[in-house]
Image: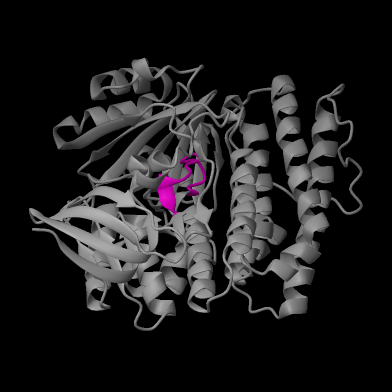
Amino acid sequence: MTTASSHDVVILGGGLAGLCLALQLRQRFEGIDVVVVERKRHPLPPAAHKVGESTVEIGAHYFAETLGLRDHLDAEHIRKFGFRFFFSEGREDLENLTELGVSQVMPTPTWQIDRGIFENHLGDVARERGISFLDGAVVRGVDMGSGEDEHIVRATVDGAERQFRARWVVDASGRAGVLKRKFDLAEPDNGHHANAVWFRIDDRLAIDDWIGDTAWGGRCTPAERWRSTNHLCGPGYWVWLIPLGSGAHSVGIVCDATMHPLEKMNTFERALEWLREFQPLVARHCESRRDKLMDFLFFRDFSYGCKQVFSGDRWAITGEAGVFLDPFYSPGSDFIAIANTYICELVALDRARKPLAAYARLYEQFYFSFYENTLSLYRDQYAIFGDAEVMATKVIWDYTYYWGILCQLTYQERLADVALLGELREDLLAASQLNLDMQAFFRRWYEQGSRRSDAVMWDQGRIDWFLDMNATLADPLDDAGVRQRLRDNVARMRELAATIVSRAAAACPGLDVEGLPNEPEAPLPLFEKAA
Protein backbone atom coordinates (compact mmCIF):
# COMPACT_ATOMS: atom_id res chain seq x y z
CA MET A 1 0.00 0.00 0.00
CA THR A 2 1.31 3.43 -0.96
CA THR A 3 0.77 6.31 1.44
CA ALA A 4 0.62 9.89 0.16
CA SER A 5 1.16 13.28 1.78
CA SER A 6 1.27 16.90 0.59
CA HIS A 7 4.06 19.43 1.28
CA ASP A 8 5.40 22.79 0.24
CA VAL A 9 8.87 21.60 -0.80
CA VAL A 10 10.41 18.16 -1.33
CA ILE A 11 14.20 18.08 -1.58
CA LEU A 12 15.80 15.09 -3.30
CA GLY A 13 19.00 14.48 -1.37
CA GLY A 14 20.00 15.26 2.19
CA GLY A 15 23.68 15.97 1.79
CA LEU A 16 25.29 19.37 2.20
CA ALA A 17 23.23 21.16 -0.47
CA GLY A 18 19.88 19.65 0.43
CA LEU A 19 20.06 20.01 4.20
CA CYS A 20 21.38 23.56 3.98
CA LEU A 21 18.54 24.51 1.65
CA ALA A 22 16.02 22.95 4.01
CA LEU A 23 17.40 24.98 6.93
CA GLN A 24 17.46 28.17 4.88
CA LEU A 25 13.85 27.70 3.76
CA ARG A 26 12.68 26.95 7.28
CA GLN A 27 14.54 29.96 8.62
CA ARG A 28 13.05 32.34 6.06
CA PHE A 29 9.48 31.06 5.85
CA GLU A 30 7.78 30.37 9.15
CA GLY A 31 5.82 27.14 9.09
CA ILE A 32 6.96 26.03 5.62
CA ASP A 33 6.54 22.26 5.20
CA VAL A 34 9.79 20.76 3.90
CA VAL A 35 10.63 17.09 3.33
CA VAL A 36 14.19 15.91 2.65
CA VAL A 37 14.60 12.45 1.12
CA GLU A 38 18.12 11.06 1.58
CA ARG A 39 19.50 7.67 0.51
CA LYS A 40 22.29 7.38 3.10
CA ARG A 41 21.55 6.38 6.66
CA HIS A 42 22.49 8.71 9.48
CA PRO A 43 24.68 9.01 11.45
CA LEU A 44 27.34 9.22 8.77
CA PRO A 45 30.92 8.17 9.50
CA PRO A 46 33.35 11.01 10.23
CA ALA A 47 36.23 11.74 7.82
CA ALA A 48 35.75 8.93 5.29
CA HIS A 49 32.55 10.26 3.81
CA LYS A 50 32.78 13.02 1.19
CA VAL A 51 35.27 15.52 -0.14
CA GLY A 52 34.62 19.25 -0.20
CA GLU A 53 36.14 19.78 3.22
CA SER A 54 37.76 23.18 2.73
CA THR A 55 35.62 26.32 2.79
CA VAL A 56 36.37 29.77 1.46
CA GLU A 57 34.66 33.02 2.32
CA ILE A 58 31.23 32.71 0.68
CA GLY A 59 30.57 29.16 1.83
CA ALA A 60 31.94 29.88 5.30
CA HIS A 61 29.76 32.98 5.65
CA TYR A 62 26.73 31.02 4.46
CA PHE A 63 27.23 28.26 7.02
CA ALA A 64 28.21 30.52 9.92
CA GLU A 65 25.97 33.54 9.46
CA THR A 66 23.14 32.78 7.03
CA LEU A 67 22.39 29.40 8.64
CA GLY A 68 23.59 30.41 12.13
CA LEU A 69 26.03 27.52 12.58
CA ARG A 70 29.04 29.51 13.83
CA ASP A 71 29.13 27.86 17.27
CA HIS A 72 29.19 24.37 15.76
CA LEU A 73 31.94 25.32 13.30
CA ASP A 74 34.10 26.76 16.07
CA ALA A 75 33.51 23.80 18.39
CA GLU A 76 33.75 20.82 16.03
CA HIS A 77 35.82 21.93 13.05
CA ILE A 78 39.16 23.62 12.36
CA ARG A 79 39.63 27.34 11.79
CA LYS A 80 41.49 27.46 8.51
CA PHE A 81 44.92 29.11 8.31
CA GLY A 82 44.24 30.38 4.83
CA PHE A 83 45.37 28.92 1.52
CA ARG A 84 49.05 27.94 1.32
CA PHE A 85 51.13 26.87 -1.66
CA PHE A 86 54.51 25.18 -2.00
CA PHE A 87 56.14 24.92 -5.43
CA SER A 88 57.84 21.71 -4.48
CA GLU A 89 57.90 19.22 -7.34
CA GLY A 90 60.41 16.47 -6.66
CA ARG A 91 61.64 18.15 -3.46
CA GLU A 92 61.38 17.55 0.28
CA ASP A 93 63.14 20.71 1.52
CA LEU A 94 60.18 23.05 1.81
CA GLU A 95 62.30 25.58 3.67
CA ASN A 96 64.36 26.10 0.49
CA LEU A 97 61.38 26.64 -1.82
CA THR A 98 58.83 29.33 -2.57
CA GLU A 99 55.88 29.37 -0.16
CA LEU A 100 52.77 31.48 -0.73
CA GLY A 101 50.71 31.84 2.43
CA VAL A 102 49.87 34.11 5.32
CA SER A 103 51.97 34.24 8.48
CA GLN A 104 48.90 35.13 10.57
CA VAL A 105 45.27 34.08 10.12
CA MET A 106 43.20 36.36 7.89
CA PRO A 107 40.46 38.39 9.64
CA THR A 108 37.44 36.84 7.87
CA PRO A 109 37.00 33.27 9.16
CA THR A 110 36.90 30.11 7.08
CA TRP A 111 36.93 26.50 8.28
CA GLN A 112 38.12 23.02 7.39
CA ILE A 113 34.98 20.90 7.65
CA ASP A 114 34.68 17.23 8.43
CA ARG A 115 31.74 16.41 6.19
CA GLY A 116 30.53 13.45 8.24
CA ILE A 117 30.40 15.47 11.47
CA PHE A 118 28.91 18.48 9.71
CA GLU A 119 26.17 16.67 7.82
CA ASN A 120 25.19 14.71 10.92
CA HIS A 121 24.78 18.03 12.70
CA LEU A 122 22.77 19.47 9.81
CA GLY A 123 20.44 16.47 9.96
CA ASP A 124 19.96 16.86 13.72
CA VAL A 125 19.28 20.59 13.43
CA ALA A 126 16.85 20.01 10.56
CA ARG A 127 14.76 17.65 12.67
CA GLU A 128 14.93 20.00 15.66
CA ARG A 129 13.53 22.77 13.46
CA GLY A 130 10.57 20.74 12.27
CA ILE A 131 11.90 19.55 8.90
CA SER A 132 10.94 16.02 7.89
CA PHE A 133 14.37 14.51 7.21
CA LEU A 134 13.99 10.93 5.95
CA ASP A 135 17.32 9.13 5.79
CA GLY A 136 17.65 5.65 4.32
CA ALA A 137 15.01 6.65 1.75
CA VAL A 138 15.29 5.98 -1.99
CA VAL A 139 13.70 8.17 -4.66
CA ARG A 140 12.03 5.98 -7.29
CA GLY A 141 10.76 8.67 -9.64
CA VAL A 142 9.38 12.17 -10.05
CA ASP A 143 6.20 13.06 -11.91
CA MET A 144 6.00 16.76 -12.74
CA GLY A 145 2.63 18.44 -12.42
CA SER A 146 1.41 20.78 -15.12
CA GLY A 147 0.24 24.33 -14.45
CA GLU A 148 -0.66 24.69 -10.78
CA ASP A 149 -0.77 20.93 -10.17
CA GLU A 150 1.51 19.49 -7.53
CA HIS A 151 4.56 17.45 -8.43
CA ILE A 152 4.76 13.87 -7.16
CA VAL A 153 7.91 12.26 -5.75
CA ARG A 154 7.77 8.47 -5.44
CA ALA A 155 10.09 6.95 -2.86
CA THR A 156 10.73 3.92 -0.68
CA VAL A 157 11.05 4.81 3.00
CA ASP A 158 11.88 2.05 5.49
CA GLY A 159 10.59 -0.52 3.00
CA ALA A 160 7.26 1.24 2.48
CA GLU A 161 6.16 2.95 -0.73
CA ARG A 162 5.46 6.64 -0.27
CA GLN A 163 4.23 9.48 -2.48
CA PHE A 164 5.10 13.06 -1.62
CA ARG A 165 3.03 15.69 -3.36
CA ALA A 166 4.72 19.06 -3.41
CA ARG A 167 4.42 22.50 -4.90
CA TRP A 168 8.22 22.60 -5.27
CA VAL A 169 10.73 19.85 -6.04
CA VAL A 170 14.44 20.62 -5.64
CA ASP A 171 17.11 18.21 -6.82
CA ALA A 172 20.06 18.08 -4.41
CA SER A 173 20.92 14.46 -5.22
CA GLY A 174 24.55 15.13 -6.14
CA ARG A 175 26.01 13.37 -9.15
CA ALA A 176 22.95 11.13 -9.35
CA GLY A 177 21.29 14.18 -10.90
CA VAL A 178 17.67 13.00 -10.74
CA LEU A 179 16.13 16.00 -12.53
CA LYS A 180 19.15 16.53 -14.75
CA ARG A 181 18.67 13.02 -16.12
CA LYS A 182 14.89 13.36 -16.32
CA PHE A 183 15.08 16.55 -18.39
CA ASP A 184 18.31 15.67 -20.27
CA LEU A 185 20.14 18.72 -18.91
CA ALA A 186 23.68 17.32 -18.67
CA GLU A 187 26.58 19.29 -20.12
CA PRO A 188 29.48 16.89 -19.54
CA ASP A 189 32.04 18.85 -21.57
CA ASN A 190 32.66 22.37 -20.28
CA GLY A 191 36.16 22.56 -21.69
CA HIS A 192 37.90 21.77 -18.41
CA HIS A 193 39.28 18.24 -18.28
CA ALA A 194 40.82 17.18 -15.00
CA ASN A 195 40.80 14.16 -12.71
CA ALA A 196 41.12 13.73 -8.96
CA VAL A 197 41.99 10.98 -6.50
CA TRP A 198 41.79 11.32 -2.73
CA PHE A 199 42.03 9.38 0.48
CA ARG A 200 41.82 9.95 4.21
CA ILE A 201 44.51 9.03 6.77
CA ASP A 202 43.32 8.56 10.34
CA ASP A 203 46.11 10.70 11.74
CA ARG A 204 47.24 14.31 11.65
CA LEU A 205 49.68 15.16 8.85
CA ALA A 206 51.38 18.06 10.61
CA ILE A 207 53.46 19.63 7.86
CA ASP A 208 55.07 21.91 10.47
CA ASP A 209 56.81 18.88 12.01
CA TRP A 210 58.22 17.69 8.68
CA ILE A 211 60.82 20.44 8.52
CA GLY A 212 63.46 20.90 11.22
CA ASP A 213 64.37 24.48 10.29
CA THR A 214 63.29 26.61 13.28
CA ALA A 215 63.44 29.84 11.29
CA TRP A 216 61.06 28.37 8.72
CA GLY A 217 58.72 27.19 11.44
CA GLY A 218 58.76 30.57 13.16
CA ARG A 219 57.52 32.45 10.11
CA CYS A 220 53.93 31.63 11.08
CA THR A 221 52.14 32.67 14.27
CA PRO A 222 51.00 30.28 15.55
CA ALA A 223 53.32 27.70 13.94
CA GLU A 224 50.37 25.70 12.60
CA ARG A 225 50.66 25.52 8.82
CA TRP A 226 48.84 22.18 9.07
CA ARG A 227 45.57 24.13 9.59
CA SER A 228 45.85 25.59 6.09
CA THR A 229 44.62 24.00 2.92
CA ASN A 230 48.16 23.14 1.87
CA HIS A 231 48.78 22.89 -1.88
CA LEU A 232 51.95 21.21 -3.12
CA CYS A 233 52.21 22.20 -6.75
CA GLY A 234 53.88 21.27 -10.01
CA PRO A 235 53.16 21.61 -13.73
CA GLY A 236 49.67 20.29 -14.41
CA TYR A 237 48.71 19.31 -10.86
CA TRP A 238 48.35 20.15 -7.19
CA VAL A 239 48.21 17.96 -4.09
CA TRP A 240 45.98 18.94 -1.19
CA LEU A 241 46.45 18.38 2.54
CA ILE A 242 43.33 19.24 4.55
CA PRO A 243 42.96 18.56 8.30
CA LEU A 244 39.63 17.35 9.68
CA GLY A 245 38.03 17.93 13.06
CA SER A 246 37.90 14.20 13.72
CA GLY A 247 41.71 14.13 13.79
CA ALA A 248 42.06 12.61 10.32
CA HIS A 249 43.69 14.24 7.31
CA SER A 250 42.41 14.41 3.74
CA VAL A 251 44.92 13.99 0.91
CA GLY A 252 44.09 14.57 -2.75
CA ILE A 253 45.79 14.75 -6.13
CA VAL A 254 44.14 16.88 -8.81
CA CYS A 255 45.61 16.79 -12.31
CA ASP A 256 45.15 18.03 -15.83
CA ALA A 257 43.91 14.92 -17.62
CA THR A 258 46.40 15.21 -20.49
CA MET A 259 49.49 15.94 -18.39
CA HIS A 260 49.01 13.35 -15.63
CA PRO A 261 46.74 10.43 -16.64
CA LEU A 262 44.37 9.06 -14.02
CA GLU A 263 45.65 5.53 -14.66
CA LYS A 264 48.90 6.53 -12.97
CA MET A 265 47.16 7.13 -9.64
CA ASN A 266 43.77 5.37 -9.52
CA THR A 267 44.68 3.03 -6.63
CA PHE A 268 46.35 3.85 -3.34
CA GLU A 269 49.54 2.05 -4.37
CA ARG A 270 49.66 3.85 -7.71
CA ALA A 271 48.97 7.17 -5.99
CA LEU A 272 51.86 6.54 -3.60
CA GLU A 273 54.14 5.70 -6.52
CA TRP A 274 53.09 8.91 -8.29
CA LEU A 275 53.68 10.93 -5.11
CA ARG A 276 57.14 9.41 -4.67
CA GLU A 277 58.10 10.89 -8.03
CA PHE A 278 56.37 14.27 -7.85
CA GLN A 279 55.85 15.06 -4.15
CA PRO A 280 58.13 12.68 -2.22
CA LEU A 281 57.65 14.41 1.14
CA VAL A 282 53.91 13.73 1.05
CA ALA A 283 54.55 10.19 -0.16
CA ARG A 284 56.89 9.44 2.73
CA HIS A 285 54.48 10.63 5.42
CA CYS A 286 51.47 8.88 3.87
CA GLU A 287 53.40 5.64 3.38
CA SER A 288 54.46 5.60 7.02
CA ARG A 289 50.75 5.69 7.93
CA ARG A 290 49.40 3.22 5.40
CA ASP A 291 47.93 1.19 8.27
CA LYS A 292 45.70 4.20 9.00
CA LEU A 293 44.25 4.48 5.50
CA MET A 294 40.49 5.03 5.77
CA ASP A 295 39.34 5.14 2.14
CA PHE A 296 40.40 5.76 -1.45
CA LEU A 297 38.27 7.25 -4.22
CA PHE A 298 38.66 8.97 -7.57
CA PHE A 299 36.72 10.96 -10.17
CA ARG A 300 37.53 11.04 -13.85
CA ASP A 301 36.75 14.28 -15.72
CA PHE A 302 35.01 15.71 -12.67
CA SER A 303 33.99 19.13 -14.04
CA TYR A 304 30.63 19.61 -15.76
CA GLY A 305 27.81 22.04 -16.40
CA CYS A 306 24.03 21.94 -16.68
CA LYS A 307 21.64 23.38 -19.25
CA GLN A 308 19.11 24.62 -16.69
CA VAL A 309 18.96 24.84 -12.89
CA PHE A 310 15.88 27.00 -12.11
CA SER A 311 12.40 26.76 -13.58
CA GLY A 312 9.23 28.80 -13.43
CA ASP A 313 7.46 25.44 -13.24
CA ARG A 314 8.54 25.23 -9.58
CA TRP A 315 11.56 23.00 -9.74
CA ALA A 316 15.24 23.70 -9.20
CA ILE A 317 18.64 22.04 -9.00
CA THR A 318 21.37 22.80 -6.45
CA GLY A 319 24.84 21.58 -5.57
CA GLU A 320 26.57 18.87 -7.58
CA ALA A 321 23.24 17.80 -9.04
CA GLY A 322 23.71 20.84 -11.29
CA VAL A 323 27.28 22.03 -11.88
CA PHE A 324 30.73 21.25 -10.57
CA LEU A 325 33.82 23.35 -11.27
CA ASP A 326 37.02 22.21 -9.60
CA PRO A 327 38.19 21.64 -6.01
CA PHE A 328 40.89 24.31 -6.41
CA TYR A 329 39.83 27.43 -4.46
CA SER A 330 37.07 25.24 -2.91
CA PRO A 331 34.08 26.79 -4.73
CA GLY A 332 31.65 23.92 -4.08
CA SER A 333 30.05 25.29 -0.92
CA ASP A 334 30.06 28.79 -2.47
CA PHE A 335 27.87 27.63 -5.33
CA ILE A 336 25.59 25.75 -2.95
CA ALA A 337 25.11 29.03 -1.06
CA ILE A 338 24.41 30.96 -4.25
CA ALA A 339 22.00 28.41 -5.76
CA ASN A 340 20.12 27.95 -2.48
CA THR A 341 19.74 31.70 -2.09
CA TYR A 342 18.21 32.01 -5.55
CA ILE A 343 15.90 29.07 -4.84
CA CYS A 344 14.69 30.77 -1.65
CA GLU A 345 14.02 33.94 -3.66
CA LEU A 346 11.94 31.97 -6.17
CA VAL A 347 9.98 30.27 -3.40
CA ALA A 348 9.33 33.71 -1.86
CA LEU A 349 7.97 35.01 -5.17
CA ASP A 350 5.79 31.94 -5.54
CA ARG A 351 4.40 32.25 -2.01
CA ALA A 352 3.51 35.84 -2.88
CA ARG A 353 1.78 34.44 -6.00
CA LYS A 354 4.00 36.45 -8.34
CA PRO A 355 4.99 35.20 -11.81
CA LEU A 356 8.11 33.04 -11.67
CA ALA A 357 9.33 32.34 -15.19
CA ALA A 358 11.07 35.65 -15.87
CA TYR A 359 12.81 35.67 -12.48
CA ALA A 360 13.85 32.03 -12.84
CA ARG A 361 15.53 32.87 -16.17
CA LEU A 362 17.15 36.01 -14.75
CA TYR A 363 18.52 34.33 -11.62
CA GLU A 364 19.77 31.48 -13.77
CA GLN A 365 21.61 33.95 -16.01
CA PHE A 366 23.29 35.44 -12.94
CA TYR A 367 24.17 31.99 -11.61
CA PHE A 368 25.60 30.77 -14.90
CA SER A 369 27.62 33.97 -15.31
CA PHE A 370 29.21 33.33 -11.90
CA TYR A 371 29.85 29.73 -12.96
CA GLU A 372 31.47 30.72 -16.29
CA ASN A 373 33.60 33.43 -14.71
CA THR A 374 34.84 31.02 -12.06
CA LEU A 375 35.46 28.28 -14.63
CA SER A 376 37.85 30.63 -16.43
CA LEU A 377 40.17 30.44 -13.40
CA TYR A 378 40.75 26.73 -14.15
CA ARG A 379 40.25 26.09 -17.85
CA ASP A 380 43.65 25.60 -19.57
CA GLN A 381 45.43 26.94 -16.47
CA TYR A 382 46.86 23.81 -14.81
CA ALA A 383 50.26 24.01 -16.51
CA ILE A 384 50.81 27.32 -14.69
CA PHE A 385 50.73 25.56 -11.31
CA GLY A 386 54.41 24.70 -11.72
CA ASP A 387 55.60 28.32 -11.95
CA ALA A 388 56.01 29.93 -8.54
CA GLU A 389 56.00 33.55 -9.70
CA VAL A 390 53.20 33.32 -12.25
CA MET A 391 50.99 31.11 -10.10
CA ALA A 392 51.47 33.14 -6.94
CA THR A 393 50.54 36.28 -8.86
CA LYS A 394 47.53 34.55 -10.40
CA VAL A 395 46.31 33.56 -6.93
CA ILE A 396 46.41 37.21 -5.82
CA TRP A 397 44.53 38.22 -8.97
CA ASP A 398 41.94 35.46 -8.64
CA TYR A 399 41.20 36.33 -5.02
CA THR A 400 40.99 40.03 -5.78
CA TYR A 401 38.31 39.22 -8.38
CA TYR A 402 36.53 36.84 -5.98
CA TRP A 403 36.58 39.09 -2.93
CA GLY A 404 35.94 42.20 -4.99
CA ILE A 405 32.85 41.08 -6.91
CA LEU A 406 31.17 37.79 -5.98
CA CYS A 407 31.89 38.04 -2.25
CA GLN A 408 30.50 41.56 -2.16
CA LEU A 409 27.23 40.49 -3.77
CA THR A 410 26.94 37.61 -1.31
CA TYR A 411 27.98 39.31 1.94
CA GLN A 412 25.83 42.35 1.14
CA GLU A 413 22.86 40.08 0.25
CA ARG A 414 22.61 41.48 -3.30
CA LEU A 415 22.70 38.30 -5.38
CA ALA A 416 19.07 38.83 -6.38
CA ASP A 417 19.19 42.64 -6.48
CA VAL A 418 18.07 43.00 -10.09
CA ALA A 419 18.23 46.81 -10.00
CA LEU A 420 21.81 46.85 -8.69
CA LEU A 421 23.04 44.23 -11.13
CA GLY A 422 21.33 46.04 -13.98
CA GLU A 423 22.81 49.40 -13.02
CA LEU A 424 26.32 47.95 -12.70
CA ARG A 425 26.03 45.67 -15.70
CA GLU A 426 28.71 47.44 -17.75
CA ASP A 427 31.13 47.56 -14.80
CA LEU A 428 30.64 43.86 -14.09
CA LEU A 429 31.00 42.90 -17.75
CA ALA A 430 34.21 44.94 -17.92
CA ALA A 431 35.54 43.12 -14.85
CA SER A 432 34.61 39.78 -16.38
CA GLN A 433 36.35 40.57 -19.66
CA LEU A 434 39.42 41.86 -17.84
CA ASN A 435 39.57 38.59 -15.90
CA LEU A 436 39.39 36.56 -19.13
CA ASP A 437 42.16 38.69 -20.62
CA MET A 438 44.33 38.25 -17.53
CA GLN A 439 43.86 34.47 -17.49
CA ALA A 440 45.12 34.37 -21.09
CA PHE A 441 47.98 36.67 -20.09
CA PHE A 442 49.03 34.34 -17.27
CA ARG A 443 49.28 31.51 -19.78
CA ARG A 444 51.51 33.63 -22.05
CA TRP A 445 53.65 34.75 -19.12
CA TYR A 446 54.08 31.14 -17.99
CA GLU A 447 55.41 30.20 -21.41
CA GLN A 448 58.23 32.71 -20.92
CA GLY A 449 58.64 32.27 -17.16
CA SER A 450 61.69 31.04 -15.28
CA ARG A 451 60.04 28.17 -13.36
CA ARG A 452 62.26 28.95 -10.36
CA SER A 453 61.22 28.09 -6.80
CA ASP A 454 63.42 30.24 -4.58
CA ALA A 455 63.74 30.06 -0.80
CA VAL A 456 61.20 32.77 -0.05
CA MET A 457 57.86 33.11 1.70
CA TRP A 458 55.42 35.44 -0.01
CA ASP A 459 53.02 36.57 2.69
CA GLN A 460 49.75 37.93 1.30
CA GLY A 461 48.90 39.23 4.76
CA ARG A 462 51.65 41.83 4.32
CA ILE A 463 49.96 43.25 1.24
CA ASP A 464 47.93 45.94 3.01
CA TRP A 465 45.27 46.46 0.35
CA PHE A 466 44.79 42.68 -0.02
CA LEU A 467 44.43 42.18 3.73
CA ASP A 468 41.96 45.09 3.84
CA MET A 469 39.79 43.48 1.16
CA ASN A 470 39.46 40.41 3.34
CA ALA A 471 38.95 42.35 6.57
CA THR A 472 36.12 44.50 5.17
CA LEU A 473 34.03 41.78 3.49
CA ALA A 474 31.35 41.92 6.17
CA ASP A 475 31.16 45.72 6.39
CA PRO A 476 27.54 46.87 6.69
CA LEU A 477 26.93 49.01 3.59
CA ASP A 478 23.90 50.94 2.42
CA ASP A 479 22.81 50.98 -1.23
CA ALA A 480 25.19 53.78 -2.17
CA GLY A 481 28.01 52.08 -0.28
CA VAL A 482 27.52 48.77 -2.08
CA ARG A 483 27.56 50.48 -5.47
CA GLN A 484 30.68 52.46 -4.61
CA ARG A 485 32.45 49.40 -3.18
CA LEU A 486 31.83 47.41 -6.35
CA ARG A 487 32.94 50.23 -8.62
CA ASP A 488 36.05 50.80 -6.49
CA ASN A 489 36.87 47.11 -6.71
CA VAL A 490 36.56 47.08 -10.49
CA ALA A 491 38.93 50.07 -10.58
CA ARG A 492 41.30 48.19 -8.28
CA MET A 493 41.24 45.22 -10.64
CA ARG A 494 42.33 47.51 -13.50
CA GLU A 495 45.17 48.94 -11.42
CA LEU A 496 46.22 45.47 -10.28
CA ALA A 497 46.18 44.23 -13.86
CA ALA A 498 48.36 47.16 -14.95
CA THR A 499 50.76 46.52 -12.06
CA ILE A 500 51.08 42.80 -12.87
CA VAL A 501 51.42 43.30 -16.62
CA SER A 502 54.02 46.06 -16.34
CA ARG A 503 56.14 44.02 -13.91
CA ALA A 504 55.94 40.88 -16.03
CA ALA A 505 56.73 42.77 -19.23
CA ALA A 506 59.81 44.35 -17.64
CA ALA A 507 61.09 40.91 -16.60
CA CYS A 508 60.16 39.17 -19.88
CA PRO A 509 61.00 41.34 -22.90
CA GLY A 510 58.78 40.53 -25.85
CA LEU A 511 55.85 39.36 -23.70
CA ASP A 512 52.57 40.08 -25.50
CA VAL A 513 50.65 42.66 -23.46
CA GLU A 514 48.51 44.06 -26.27
CA GLY A 515 45.03 45.16 -25.13
CA LEU A 516 45.90 44.98 -21.43
CA PRO A 517 46.39 47.87 -19.01
CA ASN A 518 50.14 48.12 -18.47
CA GLU A 519 50.81 51.63 -17.17
CA PRO A 520 49.60 51.74 -13.56
CA GLU A 521 48.84 55.19 -12.19
CA ALA A 522 49.68 54.05 -8.66
CA PRO A 523 51.21 50.55 -8.75
CA LEU A 524 49.74 48.27 -6.11
CA PRO A 525 52.21 46.63 -3.71
CA LEU A 526 52.46 42.88 -4.18
CA PHE A 527 54.81 40.46 -2.44
CA GLU A 528 57.20 41.04 0.42
CA LYS A 529 59.50 38.43 1.86
CA ALA A 530 58.44 37.32 5.33
CA ALA A 531 60.91 38.08 8.10
Q: Where is 27 relative to 270, above or below? A: below
Residue shown at 50% from the left, 72% from the top: 350
Q: Quadrant of residue 2?
A: bottom left
Q: Which is more toward the observer, 194 or 103?
A: 194
Q: Main secondary structure of the magenta part?
A: loop
Q: Which is more toward the observer, 417 or 262?
A: 417
Residue shown at 28% from the left, 56% from the top: 153
Q: Which is more toward the observer, 382 or 219?
A: 382
Residue 497 drawn at (x, y percent): 80, 44
Q: Where is 60 relative to 521, above or below? A: below
- Give the side of residue 267 with respect to residue 91, left or right: left
Q: What stretch is highlighted in magenta?
A: 317-331
Residue shown at 47% from the left, 51% from the top: 218
Residue 394 drawn at (x, y percent): 66, 40
Residue 426 drawn at (x, y percent): 82, 55
- Give the side of residue 485 with respect to residue 125, left or right: right
Q: Where is 154 relative to 519, above or below? A: below
- Give the side of residue 285 with respect to residue 355, left or right: left
Residue 421 visible in this rendered orientation of the protein:
yes
Residue 487 within the magenta-colored segment of the rendering: no
